[in-house]
Image: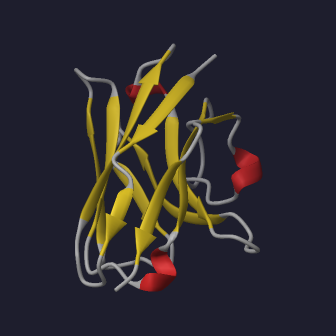
Amino acid sequence: QVQLVESGGGSVQPGDSLGLSCAASGRSIDSITVGWFRQAPGKEREFVAGMRWRTRSTRFGNSVKGRLTISGDNAKNTVFLQMNSLRPEDTAVYYCAASLSYSGILMTSAGSYDYWGQGTQVNVSS
């Protein structure tokens, strides 16, 4: 199994940047697909970004494309999400998720991921 712990959430103003971390244990990030999702109150869980460390494959959700980068540190077994130019609509609980699947196109649906962190809150407001 894979255990995931998100951190780095907080309150920022529009236009600010924020970095999130997803620390994984149980499996190396070079053998799993890691995805970031977010969920705002009353909204569906939305794909933000995903990465396969070994192949450096990445994919980004349309809502955040161009405003973030995803990276990893294999030694720390941690995946990072750097978000820039944050907007109020980015306010949500952000989750990292993992799948043992490493085949085909990088998954963007929440149902494709088997392991989830507890989430970290991001608030963007004036």
Count of numbered marks: 0
Quarter of the picture containing the C terminus is bottom left
Q: Position of residue 1 (x, y in %)?
A: 64, 16
Q: Is residue 2 above or below residue 86?
A: above
Viewer-side residue, 10 vs 36: 10
Q: Residue 116 falls in which quadrant of the image?
A: top right
Q: Is residue 108 above or below residue 25?
A: below
Q: Position of residue 21 (x, y in %)?
A: 34, 42
Q: Position of residue 114 (x, y in %)?
A: 71, 35
Name the residue at the front extreme. 126
Q: Is residue 59 above or below residue 85?
A: above
| Rendered residue at 33%/78% (across/down) | 86
| Rendered residue at 50%/83% (across/down) | 89
| Rendered residue at 57%/62% (across/down) | 38
Instruction: Identify the colour scheme used.
Output: secondary structure
Q: Position of residue 105 (x, y in %)?
A: 57, 55
Task: Determine whether, in the image, residue 76 is placed left or right of residue 29.
Answer: left
| Rendered residue at 35%/41% (across/down) | 55
Viewer-side residue, 17 vs 60: 17
Viewer-side residue, 93 vs 22: 93
